[in-house]
Image (cartoon, rainbow, N blue to C red):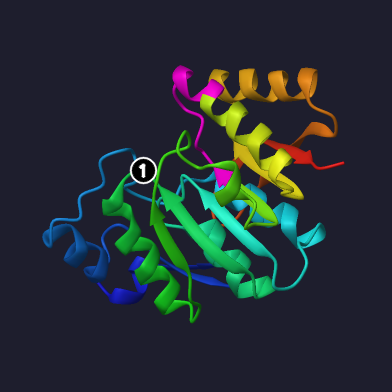
Amino acid sequence: MAVNSQVRRSFGLRILKSGHKEIRRLKNAGHEPEIHGNKFWNSSYLTMDYLKTHPIRKRARVMEIGCGWGLLGIYCAKMFDARVTGVDADKHVLPYMELHAKINGVKVNMEQNSFEKLSTARLSEFDVIVGSDICFWDYMTVPLYNLIRRALRAGVKQVIISDPCRPPFTELATRCMDRLANADTIERAVMRPVHASGELLIVKNR
């Protein structure tokens, strides 16, 4: 199979498919993701499509939580010259983010950490927090809600989380809209590079 058939180009990025030789090389080196970080998840494209018309400011400090392979953070670095840190509880996904940052000509920082351990002091170092497909188990709703509250207290200007509307995400969004000012959801759908639809939870600081 030709190498080019294993490279997808979308939203200005080069994206390696799971069968690409460099992805296989990382897996063979022992970097086997443990928490569903085995590919790019489609909700990332929903946020990228949103940011095309609602861009973040240039050089913003961006944290991608539950980053997996880091597509969303890399997009922010590429398109907005953002200073990006990808955070994931699974250390084995971080080499995949590093690989994609390299082939897209950007630099990102990477950090192994969990939602619960991201302190207010750490969050205060960022302007924007993004995440996609990160609220897929019921128990994640409360830690993510608490993280968003800490982020707002820390002065983070905007939190954007996208999802295909799994029940835990819907619960998170409802809780935010009921209890936090300036929280809302918007529907989003894209046809390329894949068919994807869902919602974005957008929480802005006062």
Residue located 47% across and 33% down the image: 116
Which residue lies under the disc numbered 1? 89
Q: Is 87 above or below relative to 200?
A: below
Quadrant housing residue 187: top right
Q: Is 155 above or below relative to 127?
A: above
Q: Is residue 140 magenta?
A: yes
x, y percent for residue 7:
39, 69
- Please tell me whether mark 1 sits on a helix, a strand or a loop: loop
Q: Quadrant of the N terminus?
A: bottom left
Q: Which residues are magenta?
A: 131-142
x, y percent for residue 31:
20, 55
Q: Furthest-bottom residue in view?
A: 105
Q: Is 62 above or below relative to 66?
A: below
Image check: 205 left or right of 138? right
Q: Is 201 above or below relative to 97?
A: above
**Dot 1: few (<14), some (14–19), or many (≥20) neighbours within 10 Å?**
some
- Residue 65 visible at all: yes
